[in-house]
Image (cartoon, rainbow, N blue to C red):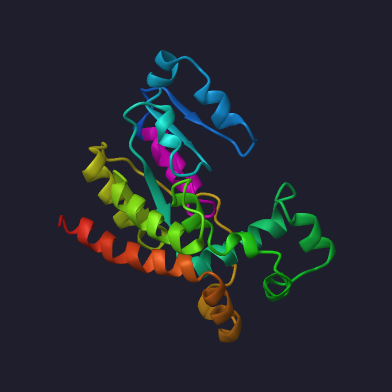
Amino acid sequence: MFLHLPKTAGMTLRGILERVYADHPIEFLTNKGGELRAFASRPLEDRARVALLAGHIPWGAQAVIPGARAITVLRDPVERVISFYHFTRRAPNALHHKAVTEGNLSLADCVESGLLAGEMNLQTAMLASRGARTPEDQLDSAGHNLRACAAFGLVERFADTVALFTRELRWPAVEWESRNVTENRPRADDLDPALVGRIRREAAFDTVLYNDALTLFERRLGGA
């Protein structure tokens, strides 16, 4: 079960998954509401035949396929928010595309107005168990669930991520290339440090989760 956190190299990983599971039944859910519920309502024997289910789905979705294990990829929170903003500008179907383009809003404008508030700690929210209500409880839950993943990776260490997935999930070696990359967009180092600092503060829970993931990733990569 690939829990695809938005703007975490999911399209690149999808290309890899399509090669790895080419001889098996796989399904990719879109962003349309109700798809996961519709899948869960299918007969058990039908669901159990699916070797891979992937999409923007939260922790706990793996329960719809008995015995399924979760994999996911995280990203530095500031870089993820920057990427989400530029995706919003270029994609007509993005949630805030009209507001951003018609208002000609900069990233700083979007942060200042709170337009991107829902993105700031989204990784923590999506990886937390449903019963976790407060941000602190979600962070604790997300950290616990991250450790329960069959494997997880980091956008900033994507080649190592593929190597770790290949080893831990016993994938065959496959070639891959980056997909859906916004060309020439600024990185955190290119922005006003004050803006980066504000995003970092507003994404505080994702930042803690990501730093925890960095340490755990190094351990897993080393085989510890």
- Residue 187 x, y percent position in the rendering: 54, 72
Picture mark count: 0
Position of residue 16 in the picture relative to residue 41 (left or right): left
Residue situated in front as seen by the camera: 3 or 82: 3
- Residue 202 x, y percent position in the rendering: 56, 72
- Residue 155 x, y percent position in the rendering: 42, 58
Q: Give the range drawn in magenta.
A: 1-19
Reply above or below: 49 against 102: above
Reply above or below: 75 against 169: below
Is residue 207 visible from the viewing direction of this image?
A: yes
Position of residue 96 in the picture relative to residue 215 (left or right): right
Task: Please say whether residue 12 is one of the residues in the magenta stretch.
Answer: yes
- Residue 220 x, y percent position in the rendering: 22, 56
Quadrant for the N terminus, please.
Answer: top left
Residue situated in front as seen by the camera: 80 or 19: 80
Instruction: Check the image and name the residue furthest to the right.
Output: 102
Task: Please say whether residue 212 is one of the residues in the magenta stretch.
Answer: no
Residue situated in front as seen by the camera: 193 or 159: 193
Quadrant for the C terminus, please.
Answer: bottom left
Q: Which residue is drawn at 40% across and 48% down?
A: 72
Q: Residue at x 29, y 52 (%)?
A: 147
Q: In which quarter of the image is residue 112?
A: bottom right
Reply above or below: 69 against 41: below
Is residue 178 visible from the viewing direction of this image?
A: no
Q: Which residue is drawn at 26% across and 37% down?
A: 171
Instruction: Check the image and name the residue furthest to the left.
Output: 224
Q: Residue at x 45, y 36 (%)?
A: 61
